[in-house]
Amino acid sequence: MFDPSSPSSPGWHLSLYPEALEGSGYFRATIQPDRTYVARGEAADPERAAAEAGRRARARLRRYCTANRLNRLGTLTYAGAGCHEPTVLREDLGEFFRNLRAGLGGKPLPYVWVPEWHKSGHGLHAHFALGKYVPRRLIEQAWGHGFVHITLINNLPHGSGVVEEARRAAGYVSKYVAKTFADADARVLGLHRYDVAQGFQPERVRLWAKSSSGVLEQASQHLQARPVTVWNSDDEEIWGGPPAIWAQWSGK
């Protein structure tokens, strides 16, 4: 019996993230190509594999930031000689966010953080994003290792809302993640490239249709709005993957 909800069913499949106002999909043919397993680090084209992994990571970050309306960007820097141990940075960040939650009343708090190496040799610092106003004094007390900076994303066209602010914030933090895919020296094996608060991942709704326009129409009906941006692989002169689509919707 044909089951359109099954990922193996031929046709157009789209993953819609209503809270993030975003969806991406692909066409699955009846006959699938042979996809032989390739061990990590042994891809035929490592650069392309790294670029694709980076794209997926940026997409996850963008959806997380948008779904949780993370529109405030901050930086945590060490005083003195700085921090040169990635594990120590992660321990300090864990303590920082625990302190921050406690200072805000103890309720779960969505956030994302990304480490970065100083170009000056000062070691590591961290960029983070939040979705609510937090007094600078509280951030400084929660960190306690040096200096802090926090700002609301506001350099957007007139009329832009918190969704666009969060997408812009995601763009900033994801560029640091992208560095770890492009530069092997920026990655510490065994450690996450970034981290987010658990329990705030955006919901995914699976949609299916016989055509790309059909699955986009379903998504638009679900969100009760038309997409403001649509990308289709058919419009690309060079495209090596299966037919694909991607769309974003506006929001406040």
Image (cartoon, rainbow, N blue to C red):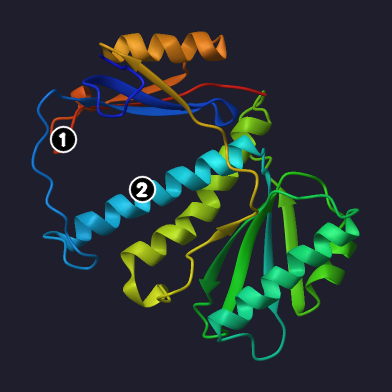
Q: Residue at x 54, y 51 (%)?
A: 172
Residue 159 location, quadrant: top right
Q: Nearer the viewer, residue 119 or 169?
A: 169
Question: Dot 1 lies on which element?
Answer: loop
Cβ atoms at labels 1 and 2 below 8 Å apart:
no
* Residue 182 located left or right of residue 242: right
Res 66 label: none
> What kind of residue is marked 1?
Trp
In the picture shown, does residue 200 fall above or below 3? below
In the picture shown, does residue 210 fall above or below 34? above
Q: Residue at x 44, y 43 (%)?
A: 59
* Residue 26 located left or right of residue 15: left
The residue singled out by tag 1 in the image is 239
Q: Is residue 200 visible?
A: yes
Q: Nearer the viewer, residue 195 or 37?
A: 37
Quadrant of the drawing holding the C terminus? top right
Question: Dot 2 lies on which element?
Answer: helix
Q: Mark 2, residues whose alpha carbon is within 10 Å: few (<14), some, or many (≥20)?
A: some
Relative image position of residue 63 (x, y in whole percent): 52, 39
Q: Earlier in the sequence, mark 1 or mark 2?
A: 2
Relative image position of residue 77 (x, y in whole percent): 68, 74
The residue singled out by tag 2 in the image is 55
* Residue 46 located left or right of residue 110: left
Q: Residue at x 40, y 66 (%)?
A: 180
In the picture shown, does residue 88 fall above or below 93? below
Residue 224 location, quadrant: top right
Q: Nearer the viewer, residue 243 or 160?
A: 243
